[in-house]
Amino acid sequence: QVQLVESGGGSVQAGGSLRLNCAASGDTFIMGWFRQAPGKEREGVAAMVTALGLAVYADSVKGRFTMSRDSSENTLYLQMNSLKPEDTAMYYCAANRRGSSTRLRRLDPSDYNAWGQGTQVTVSS
């Protein structure tokens, strides 16, 4: 089972930036970032097939968030710019050693079987 540890959350004002980190142990086929605000369902933010390194994004974050991976460190990143109050949520890193590249764009949490503990992001107006 892949182990994931997130870091990098915090509180910023609207328009600010944060970078989330996710250190992974073990091989992965797909990795993703998800978020969950209080009272809402978990939603996909971005995902990639780790061997390809090309990310897909939710429409709500496209152009503002950038997902990347350092294969030498086995670490996933989420650079978040132009943050908005509606970006406030607990952010989770997720992974699976198996998966489907054709399903990647669905950003479906059920495609992932390893989850980090989460890191809080709070954006104030």
Image: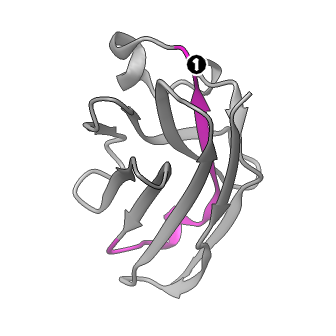
Q: Amino acid at mark 1?
A: Asp
Residue 100 spot, x, y in % from top left:
42, 11
| Residue furthest front as drawn | 72
Residue 109 spot, x, y in % from top left:
61, 27
Q: Which residue is mark 1?
A: 111
The secondary structure type at the circle numbered 1 is: helix
Residue 16 spot, x, y in % from top left:
39, 84
Q: How is the image coloured?
A: one colour
Residue displayed at 27% across by 30% down: 52
User: Is 97 colored magenta in this rendering?
Assistant: yes
Is 42 situated left or right of 104 in this image?
right
Residue displayed at 27% across by 50% down: 62
Residue 2, located in which quarter of the rendered image?
Answer: top right
Is 117 situated left or right of 31 in this image?
right
Residue 7, located in which quarter of the rendered image?
Answer: bottom right
Does residue 46 sit above or below 64 in this rendering? above
Relative depth, front residue between 79 and 21: 21
Tell me the quarter of the image containing the N terminus.
top right
Does residue 3 sit above or below 18 in this rendering? above
Relative depth, front residue between 83 and 24: 24
* Segment colored magenta: 81-98
User: Is 85 colored magenta in this rendering?
Assistant: yes
Residue 19 spot, x, y in % from top left:
46, 71
Residue displayed at 57% across by 55% down: 22
